Amino acid sequence: MDFKPFTAVGKLDYEGLLRNIAREGTPDRVYFIELFQDRAVEDAIDRRYGVTEHLDRNDPRFEWKRQIAMQRFLGYETVDVALLGLPSGEWARAEDTTRGDQSRGERGWINEHKGVIASWEDFERYPWPDGRTWNTERLEWLERNLPDDMCLAGRGGHFCEYLCWLMGYETLCLTLHDQPDLVEALRRRILELEEAACRVVLQSPRVKAFWASDDMGFKTQLMVSPDDTRRLVLSGHKRLAEVTHQAGRQYWLHACGARQAIIEDLIEDVKLDALHSWEDVIEPVTDAKRRYGHRLSLFGGIDVDFLCRASPEQLRRRVRDTLRVCQPGGGYCLGSGNSVANYVPADNYLTMLDEGRRWRG
């Protein structure tokens, strides 16, 4: 195997992670959070360092064990678990131009022109889950087998995303004008299912947070107007946050896009514990720390474009500069500005983590 990627040994401590996110003072180490690492990046790291070589690939639970092994190797305290997944619209596809062994061959995205629900007839025909029975096999296995220094984070809260995916973004915009009652019915059904799934996940004592993931905008604005976002999207997150806080857990949110028009709503009305996705062209995480760091914890912020293009020394300097601003007082976890996409060089990703491990304030 190749040389080990980290120059400093890390120790997992999910309780310390939660105290850090609760902003209970400057932590004595850097904690890491990532929305996800693309499987191609994980496989490249596995081939190089033999992360899963001790596992039996014929084991029916290999994937569950692989995820734990990879998260521990990289230094993450959390393993994610989700129950709800709604079949979405048509997918558009194109060649993946990523070079080398991290290429997936093909790249896909939801067709923005049309989805599977454009009428009341489509709404009634859609194969909605009944909201009463859930496949909890993986959750129950993780409860029994997750190492004691790790915790589970529930996943869900795709309110804006499901509206866009199920209807298609263009159809959603037209239907907001032509049939607002259909959009409202769709919102209510999504919330009903999201809340039911969230409540089941939170029954597990190993689940210490609920991490919603809901892209609401793009570089310059929200997907729909601020008022529509508050009514259709933030109302759902407010309800899930209430359920999560009533269970004594933290509510985290990943949301891409320009959120300046609703940031106060996220902090004061939804009452987020932490917010993720910070892009330099929208709002650098260091600026966000100065503005909101006393009211909100922040995840990530090492811009993905920079993570792809920077030299190792530039990357290490960027991590140090970010930590100098964001680490004091707690409420910050190091990670990419969005996620570790398959086109992020594995060496750069590992360099970011290594510099975080070396940090001593």
Image (tube, grey):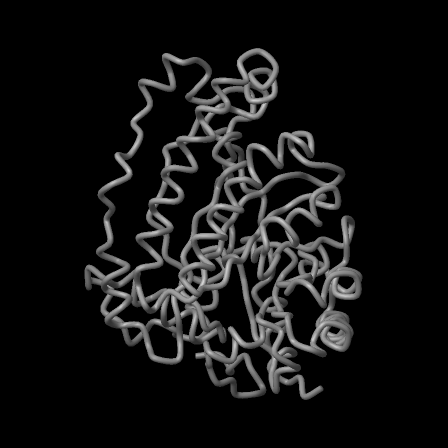
Relative image position of residue 166 (x, y in whole percent): 45, 27
Relative image position of residue 259 (x, y in whole percent): 70, 45
Residue drawn at x 29%, y 76% is 54
Direction from residue 81 to residue 240 in the image, left or right: right
Q: Is residue 76 above or below residue 124?
A: below
| Front residue of this view, candidates 218 and 45 | 218
Residue drawn at x 63%, y 46% is 256
Residue drawn at x 42%, y 75% is 72
> Which residue reaches farthest front?
246
| Front residue of this view, candidates 111 and 229 | 229
Relative image position of residue 65 (x, y in whole percent): 30, 67
Q: Is residue 96 above or below residue 144?
A: above
Check the picture and name the quadrant holding the N terminus: bottom left
- How many numbered marks are there? 0
Relative image position of residue 125 (x, y in whole percent): 31, 18
| Front residue of this view, candidates 58 and 75 | 75
Residue drawn at x 19%, y 64% is 59
Direction from residue 275 to residue 192 in the image, left or right: left
Check the picture and name the quadrant holding the C terminus: bottom right
- The quadrant in which residue 295 appears is bottom right
| Front residue of this view, candidates 338 and 354 | 338
Q: Is residue 277 above or below residue 220?
A: below
- The quadrant in which residue 5 appears is bottom right
